[in-house]
């Protein structure tokens, strides 16, 4: 892998891969839009709420009934965004989460991940949901009905304002009653879990049948909009936006910038979910119904203009009866071992790109090694060794070819001097020499091409896996998700590349190309200085092993004469 030409080839391939990814994001086909009249009235009713500025609480009388189809919703016009109005804040602290629920709407308006500091050893934790204007992000829900609606602008009553969940589960009920229909919205928080159950109990104490649909939505701003991203930001290439999963169609993403041009409007069968995704973390809503309508919207008047919503089928509650309507939320990290247990396809939020089929097995092996050694740094080193063993025969052929070419350098130099004024003749004689000595000048390229997908897949594994976030190795490397503070790993890699160049033949290369090749170790070391040290650890170990392998093969062939 350390042949200069192969390194240049790999760099060009990687650049092409990044260009392809960007093309996919910009021009890939979008899912077919499907409409369902059963939920269209609900959507129309919620359109009015969405286009309201939601600065002050809205009375229930102002919300149109489902039976009243809204056909002329005025287009939203830009207005000055104000701070969202709030009711009483309920604080829930578990072993892994700190949540805040606003009685105005019964919405989750704050979520802090207590096990994930912003920086290593920092007392400041990752805040996924927040009411601050620049980072506003909520999880909202409600019921829309022709008889009586309960929406995320209504005021709820709470029993307590502070909950400590240190073991087991705790229920946090919110109560509201209108015209004989009572809703008890209950959040069920588990002490050591990022999963939150939500149960809407409708108690119909009126004299008529209640029929309605539950909606759940994630609504946020784009905190990355117009922000310059540092080159050493590990999440600079990660997907940020909304997504959903449909069992037959799979995982679909919607970037923030596509909310206005390619909104989602689709019906999803059971076992689906919606999410707001960012690097390492996400929030998701998992469906329990047989079918859900999923839609996305851009609301320019809102402090949180990006919205993705799921609306259930209709439920009926006869007079004098009650019914529980449940759903499940997830607010937390993309822990790959746990996500498939929560919902099918939820682990796809860990986005490894087009090389997912290779990356997932690589992470599985890396995770198994970590289970044995208990250190992600040593796990990366052992995985690198396993990959080298896997491709040993390929790289052996590559280095054998390079070693034979190296032995031919004096004769090639003679040919070059003999035909210095006729480059075509020189190339012809050089190829004849290769043929006579049974040397394949392309022998070093094919093994590299085969390995490139594995290298890129491993790059994404180390970049996207939250399990490696702030993971320590040893000595000066106490955070594998941050750059090497003393640039030792980039220097080791540069040294290995430089020594490899000494063993790598460069037949027919002009002086300018030779100078560029000599500059490559320095260029790579500068680039790696900004990469996560976990990535550079892999490259440094791989480069050193490749150098050792090439040196042994070269010495062996030289000894044969």
Image (tube, rainbow, N blue to C red):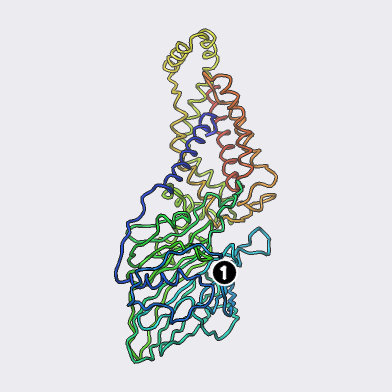
Label 1 packing within 10 angstroms: few (<14), some (14-19), many (20+): many
- Give the quarter of the image for residue 2: top right
- The residue beneath circle 1 is 111
- How far across and how far down the image is residue 277, in percent? 49, 59
The front one of 418 and 316 is 316
The front one of 357 and 399 is 357
Indicate whether 478 appears above or below 493. Answer: below
- Give the quarter of the image for residue 145: bottom left
Indicate whether 142 appears above or below 407. Answer: below
Residue in the picture at 52% in, 34% down:
1
Residue in the picture at 44% in, 57% down:
259
Residue 317 in the figure: left or right of residue 370: left
Extreme-left residue of the structure: 37
- Give the quarter of the image for residue 68: bottom left
Tally of marks? 1
- How far across and how far down the image is residue 150, in percent? 43, 80
- How far across and how far down the image is residue 371, in percent? 54, 57
Residue in the picture at 40% in, 55% down:
262
- How far across and how far down the image is residue 461, in percent? 51, 50
Query: The residue tagged with tag 1: helix, strand or loop?
Result: strand
């Amino acid at each position: 892998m350390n042949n200069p030409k192969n390194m240049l080839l790999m760099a060009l391939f990687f650049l092409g891969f990044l260009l392809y990814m960007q093309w996919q994001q910009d021009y890939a086909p979008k899912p077919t839009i499907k409409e369902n009249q059963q939920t269209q009235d609900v959507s129309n009713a919620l359109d009015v709420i969405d286009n309201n500025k939601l600065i002050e609480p809205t009375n229930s009388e102002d919300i149109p009934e489902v039976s009243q189809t809204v056909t002329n919703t005025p287009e939203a016009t830009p207005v000055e965004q104000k701070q969202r109005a709030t009711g009483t804040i309920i604080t829930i602290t578990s072993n892994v989460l700190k949540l805040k629920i606003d009685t105005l709407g019964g919405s989750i308006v704050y979520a802090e991940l207590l096990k994930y500091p912003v920086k290593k050893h920092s007392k400041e934790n990752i805040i996924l949901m927040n009411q601050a204007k620049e980072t506003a992000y909520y999880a909202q829900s409600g019921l829309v009905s022709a008889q009586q609606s309960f929406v995320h602008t209504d005021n709820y009553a709470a029993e307590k304002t502070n909950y400590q969940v240190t073991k087991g589960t705790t229920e946090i009920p919110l109560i509201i009653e209108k015209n004989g229909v009572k809703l008890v919205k209950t959040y069920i928080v588990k002490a050591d879990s990022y999963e939150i159950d939500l149960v809407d109990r409708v108690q119909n104490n009126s004299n008529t049948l209640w029929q309605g649909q539950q909606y759940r939505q994630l609504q946020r701003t784009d905190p990355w909009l117009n922000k310059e991203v540092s080159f050493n930001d590990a999440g600079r290439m990660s997907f940020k936006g909304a997504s959903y999963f449909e069992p037959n169609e799979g995982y679909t993403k919607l970037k923030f910038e596509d909310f206005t041009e390619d909104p989602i409007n689709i019906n999803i069968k059971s076992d689906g979910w919606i999410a707001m995704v960012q690097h390492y973390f996400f929030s998701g809503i998992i469906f329990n119904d047989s079918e859900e309508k999923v839609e996305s919207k851009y609301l320019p008047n809102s402090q949180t203009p990006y919205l993705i919503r799921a609306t259930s089928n209709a439920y009926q509650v006869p007079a004098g009866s009650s019914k529980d309507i449940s759903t499940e939320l997830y607010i937390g990290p993309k822990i790959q071992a746990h996500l498939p247990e929560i919902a099918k396809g939820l682990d796809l939020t860990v986005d490894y790109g087009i090389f997912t089929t290779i990356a997932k097995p690589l992470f599985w092996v890396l995770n198994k090694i970590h289970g044995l050694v208990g250190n992600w740094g040593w796990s990366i080193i052992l995985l690198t060794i396993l990959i080298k063993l896997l491709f040993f025969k390929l790289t052996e052929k590559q280095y054998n070819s390079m070693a034979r070419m190296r032995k031919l350098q004096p004769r090639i130099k003679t040919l070059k001097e003999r035909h210095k004024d006729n480059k075509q003749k020189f190339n012809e004689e050089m190829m004849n020499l290769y043929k006579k000595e049974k040397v394949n000048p392309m022998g070093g390229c094919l093994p590299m091409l085969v390995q490139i997908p594995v290298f890129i897949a491993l790059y994404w594994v180390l970049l996207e896996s939250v399990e490696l976030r702030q993971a320590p190795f040893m000595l000066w490397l106490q955070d594998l998700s941050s750059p090497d503070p003393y640039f030792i790993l980039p220097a080791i890699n540069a040294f290995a590349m430089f020594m490899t160049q000494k063993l790598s033949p460069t037949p027919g290369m002009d002086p300018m190309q030779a100078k560029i090749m000599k500059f490559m170790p320095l260029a790579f070391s500068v680039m790696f200085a900004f990469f996560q040290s976990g990535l550079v650890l892999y490259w440094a170990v791989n480069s050193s092993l490749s150098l050792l392998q090439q040196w042994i093969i070269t010495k062996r062939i030289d000894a044969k004469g």
